Amino acid sequence: MSYSQVQFSDMQSTFISNYMEMEEPVQEKEQQGNWCQRTFGPLKKGGIRMSIISLLAPCLGVGMLGLPYRAKEQGLIIELVLIALCGIISCISMHILSWSAGDLQCSSFSELIQMSLGNKMKRLFEILTICQCLLGITQIQISFQLFIYELFKYFEITIDQRELAIITQLLFIIPNLLISFQKTLYRLRYFSLIGVISVIYITILTSLDYFIRGQYKDNITLKLIDIDFNIFTTFAMTFFCYLCHLFIFPIRKELHNPTIQRQSKIWKRQCLICYIIYSLICICGYLRFGDDTQTWVINNYHGDFFFIGKLGMSFALFFAVPLNILACRQIIHDMLLSDEMEYQLKHRSLRIQAQDGKITFEVDSVDSFRSKIHIYSTLILQFGSAILALILPNINRYITLLGGLLGTTMVCLIPVLIYLREYRDKLNYYIVILEIMGVVFGWIGALYGQF
């Protein structure tokens, strides 16, 4: 072991990558079986199926329940085109991030931006992402409160909505917090599965309801195409349904044999599943109710089966909070660990150890510092979002901000900048055009949606 002082920028990425690898042991290669075993067998760490479920869980939420209402505003054909367009842009961004992360050997989103776009862009990304995640978790908390209120209405229990929101937070925040302390997607796998199953159940139920019963009344007015300036806001709110890109790096870390081909299967299948579910809910929900479609189409339905669906969606929202906290906490870890490393290098000695051809870096007090980050960031995100959920009433306004301004910046602008920087010699201009289109549409929609 030897001691030396080195420049922080040359070793920060390597230290964080090596340090993060210590958290979980590598999963052994899963046994190959037949199609039935691979599809319905236990969820194993590092498998493609578990990765797809982990990526689906943050997408399949209340955003999709608003798609029939978007069709009511812009027309069914326009909304279906936007669902497909947002899915394509989302899938392209996932591939850009996984390609560049593999080529640059980066283990986190922040590290990738730092190596490709520089420290200033990295810091801007971290600030925007933390804001986006905090608003996103707040939106989930508000939606959870509203679904609990709908469950009370089913039993004809009269209660003030604001009082119920406060009671809900007091009752559920502690069990939610205990789940939020989990460190890996693998440990949250069954919570993710509950959310995905609930959404699939609602999709099947709404589809069967339309195909069996048809339109709920005669002479329903349907709108197929209606193009106006609101299309940008509709794009932003539709794009919100595909925001899951912070989970790419946790999935890459836990994925066994994370080749480009295996990662590509995950991104493509996730986007395809989302597109099918979103299209079915949009078509069947809008054709069933037409101009009477509510903001969340599930509120148009009544009966015991749909009560089960609302109950399942409540569970999905409850478990979505820990999932989103995990992704946001990773960004906070990267940001604060980088600052701590820089401080240690300037004021203390850094131990450099070479073993089996691999260099590792050890800094005094980083273990305790990292534990503090985990605890404090979880507490701040959990309680901060709960407080904001009681203060901020208008949920749709924040969805346009999330999907339009912050979402497209993170999912479209940053990936296309990385793509232009790292692959300038072999650019596909269709990719560049689609990503820039996503940025322009999203920003206009986010700003227009505030008025």
Image (cartoon, rainbow, N blue to C red):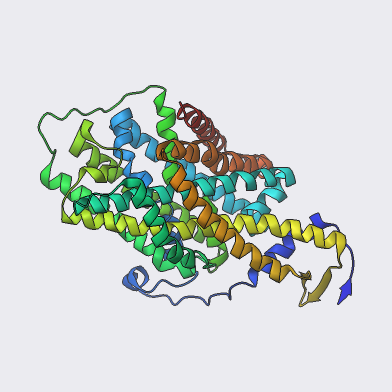
Please state if 94 lies on the left or on the right of 354 as rendered. left
Q: Is residue 6 above or below residue 137?
A: below
Frontmost residue, 396 versus 81: 396
Residue shown at the point (69%, 46%) measured from the top left: 123
Q: Where's residue 424, x and y in %?
A: 67, 40
Q: Residue at x 58, y 50 (%)?
A: 97
Q: Quadrant of the N terminus?
A: bottom right
Q: Measured from the top left, where is residue 310 in percent x and y?
A: 27, 54
- Give the image quarter of residue 291: top left
Q: Residue at x 75, y 60 (%)?
A: 340
* Image location of residue 252, percent across then percent down: 55, 61
Return the residue nearer the eye: 345 or 384.
Answer: 384
- Image mark count: 0
235 left or right of 338? left
**Which quadrant: the C terminus?**
top left
Tell me: residue 265, above or below residue 286: below
Observer-nearest residue: 212 or 368? 368
Taking the spot 47% from the left edge, 26% from the top edge, the residue there is 448
